[in-house]
Image (tube, coloured by chain):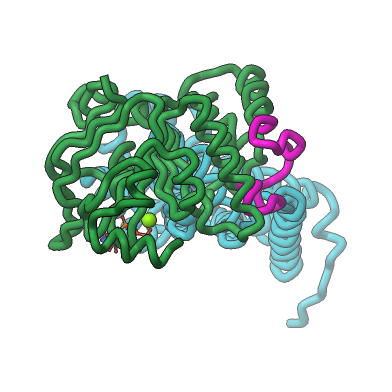
Chain colours: A green, B cyan
Amino acid sequence: MPMIEIHNVNKWYGDFHVLKNINETVEKGEVLVICGPSGSGKSTLVRCVNRLEEIDQGEIRIEGKSIHAKDQDINRLRAEIGIVFQQFNLYPHLTVLKNITLAPMKVKKIPREEAETTALALLERVGIGNQAHKYPVELSGGQQQRVAIARALAMKPKIMLFDEPTSALDPEMINEVLSVMKDLAREGMTMLCVTHEMGFAREVADRIIFMDHGEILERGTPEHFFTNPQHERTKAFLKEIL
Amino acid sequence: MQYTFNWAIIFSGEYGRWFLDGLATTLEMSGISIVLALVLGTFLTVLRLSRITPLVWFAVSYIEFFRNTPLMVQIFFWYFGSDPILPGFFKAWLYRQNIEFATAIIALSTYTAAFIAEELRSGILSIPKTQLEASRATGLSFLQAMAYVILPQAFRIIIPPLISQFLNLIKNSSLAMTIGVMELTYMARQVEAHTFHGFEAFTVSTLIYLSLSLLVSFLITQYNRRFLRIGSAR
Ligand SMILES: Nc1ncnc2c1ncn2[C@@H]1O[C@H](COP(=O)(O)OP(=O)(O)OP(=O)(O)O)[C@@H](O)[C@H]1O
Ligand SMILES: [Mg+2]
């Protein structure tokens, strides 16, 4: 059974048709990279998967179960799907450690000690084990984004969504975040990544989709995508970005 | 007739004690009211931001009603007029208390809550929406996100206006004398009645209110200076 099935999804903001008949299937352990020009609907699509945005038509299923089903508890759904935003969105009033333990303790009712042990192990894994007791403002952007990844991973999600996780970073910090994401991909995490990091896409994506004006115009393996794109707009986009 | 100042009389005999008793009552009444007002104000704010229409309407009507009618009238209403609308168990409880004192607390806290709710709402609206989004995305419910992420940040932002609400409450508590609560102003009045030294009596009570206000605002800023050092920076 596929991990994520997106079936005939349409969405409007007022008159503006932001997602046009989107169909896509992501298997367990697959890494899907989504790229496309600004305003093409990439963020919107990703945010529909954990229902930060609601769709108007169609259906999205996770492991076969519709996320819009009446008996679907939305908090439970979100607990199983991690998301990492462009702007990190850490909680400024909490230490790094508390940023990470909050949801496990409150949503999953995991005891503090266990949650902290997990959090420290995750910080170690993303390479900032020694920053646990600092506040987000005391960290660099790259470190903050790695905390954000650790915060999402602390819920032991089945799926990780990334919405341009490196776009707000200084160039020298991009790699430290990408390398954490590459590790995740290798460990078999199912990932939806909106990114313009084509090196990353080439290296870890199983498939790449190209969106423009709310449509998926092109889809394929990195091989196909970089060497033999079919659509004119994909070619233009790649030319601009590579 | 020449008025002779006599400061000694204010502190002689029973009168010094009266002031202290009055001050104690003022402090107790204000302290309890502040806590209740904060709880009620927070509750109103959550209702107001809940997006559930009847709850929003309730909160908005409450806030507008209590902010836009005189506190004195509200105190009289609770004291003389509320009897027919209060539920039985509540009345039974109330009559077991010192009724004037309890009424004053109800009036002061329900009134101040409306102002606190307004301050808190603007504090919450100044927190970026992405904070709520990020917390909801980890599976926290709306109330959990409010409790652990939004409100703690909002309270830090609104501490200055909250202090002035607290100080208003202390000053407003002097209206409780009108229903016979033996707080500071009531006691000053008593001293005046017994000594005919109104100038001294009310000067002393004025100075006590003044020091109380300055002390409260000093303590709160000190507390914040430590508490806020890092956490609020963004
Ligand atoms: N809440 C909203 N209300 C109205 N229009 C919106 C809203 N959110 C997004 N849009 C519009 O929908 C379109 C798609 O937005 P989206 O954020 O999904 O694009 P994107 O592909 O992620 O772009 P970017 O690369 O700039 O992040 C944009 O034109 C945007 O202005
Ligand atoms: Mg976007």
Q: Against B87, is B6 above or below?
A: below
- Foreground residue, B204 or A167? A167
Q: Examine the image and state in which quarter residue B73 appears.
A: bottom left
Question: Is A129 one of the magenta-colored residues?
Answer: yes
Queried whether the magenta region covers residue A105, the answer comes back as no
Residue A147 visible, this angle: yes
Q: Quadrant of residue B190?
A: bottom right
Q: Which residue sits at x=49%, y=32%?
A: A185
How many marks on residues? 0
Residue A50, quarter of picture: top left
Residue B180 pos. (x, y %): 53, 48
Query: Seen in the image, is B192 located left or right of residue B30?
Result: right
**Compared with residue B160, is residue A197 higher up or lower down, i.e. above or below?**
above
Q: Residue shown at 73%/40% (left/top)?
A: A131
Question: In this picture, which residue range is highlighted in magenta?
Answer: A123-144
Position of residue B216 measured from the top left corner of the image (x, y, whole percent) = 71, 55
Image location of residue B103, percent across then percent down: 46, 42
Identify the residue shown where x is 22% and y is 53%.
Answer: A217
Residue B140 in view, yes or no? no
Choose between A188 and B132: the one closer to the eye. A188
Tell me the quarter of the image containing the N terminus of chain A: top left
The residue sitting at the front extreme is A227
Residue located at (20% from left, 31% from top): A68
**Residue closer to the observer: B101 or A119:** A119
Q: Quadrant of ligand 2?
A: bottom left
Quarter occupied by the C terminus of chain A: bottom left
Location of residue B100 in the rendering, given as x and y in whole percent from the top left corner = 49, 41
Is A182 left, or right, of A219 in this rendering? Answer: right
Residue A242 drawn above or below residue A52: below
